[in-house]
Image (cartoon, rainbow, N blue to C red):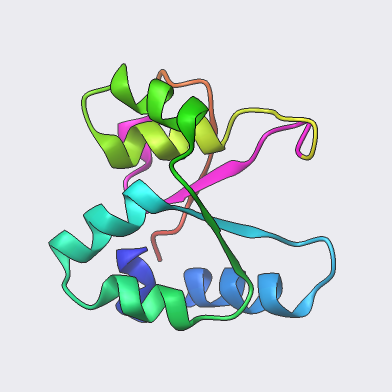
Amino acid sequence: MVAAGFGNVLVSRLIHRAHGEAGWFLYAPSCALVEADRSRPGTAEHIAALPGITFLDLDLPAALAVAREATWADAHAKYAAQPIPDRPDGAVVATADPQKWKGHPVRVLDVNP
């Protein structure tokens, strides 16, 4: 999310595609939104103003998953990437730090230039 505020071209394309193409979704876990705003103030408002982004609430199943992990943002993203009936293949975690996700059961998209 912080990369979106830095003018990352790949992230901008993902946002544009989610807004303009049917069947393309870009999810923003609430906990990741909070952490992004803490590291770069104003990020939450910027992301919230973008079209095509679906914000994921910290509902009870997500909260239980988050409670087992060290960081809320990573835990909520990992939980959001797991398969569910609407996303049987799960979701991909777009990240500027792909090494952080080694060993985790998620697919990763490196958004570094």
Residue 46 left/right relative to 36: right
Task: Tell me the quadrant of the picture where the N terminus can be found.
Answer: bottom left
Q: Nearer the viewer, residue 106 or 51?
A: 51
- Indicate the position of residue 96 as horizontal and vertical percent values: 35, 53
- Indicate the position of residue 82 as horizontal and vertical percent values: 60, 28
Q: Name the residue located 48 percent from the left edge and 37 percent from the top edge.
A: 59
Residue 89 left/right relative to 36: right
Q: Name the residue located 39 percent from the left edge and 60 percent from the top edge.
A: 112
In this view, 72 is above or below 54: above
Residue farthest along the front direction in this orientation: 60
- Indicate the position of residue 42 as horizontal and vertical percent values: 23, 78
Task: Tell me the quadrant of the picture where the C terminus can be found.
Answer: bottom left
Is residue 56 in view from this perspective?
yes
Q: Nearer the viewer, residue 54 or 5?
A: 54
Q: Name the residue located 41 percent from the left edge and 74 percent from the top edge.
A: 47
Residue 39 occupies quadrant: bottom left
Asked whether residue 93 is drawn in magenta, I would say yes
Asked whether residue 8 is drawn in magenta, I would say no
Q: Name the residue located 15 percent from the left edge and 61 percent from the top edge.
A: 38
Tell me which segment is drawn in magenta.
87-102
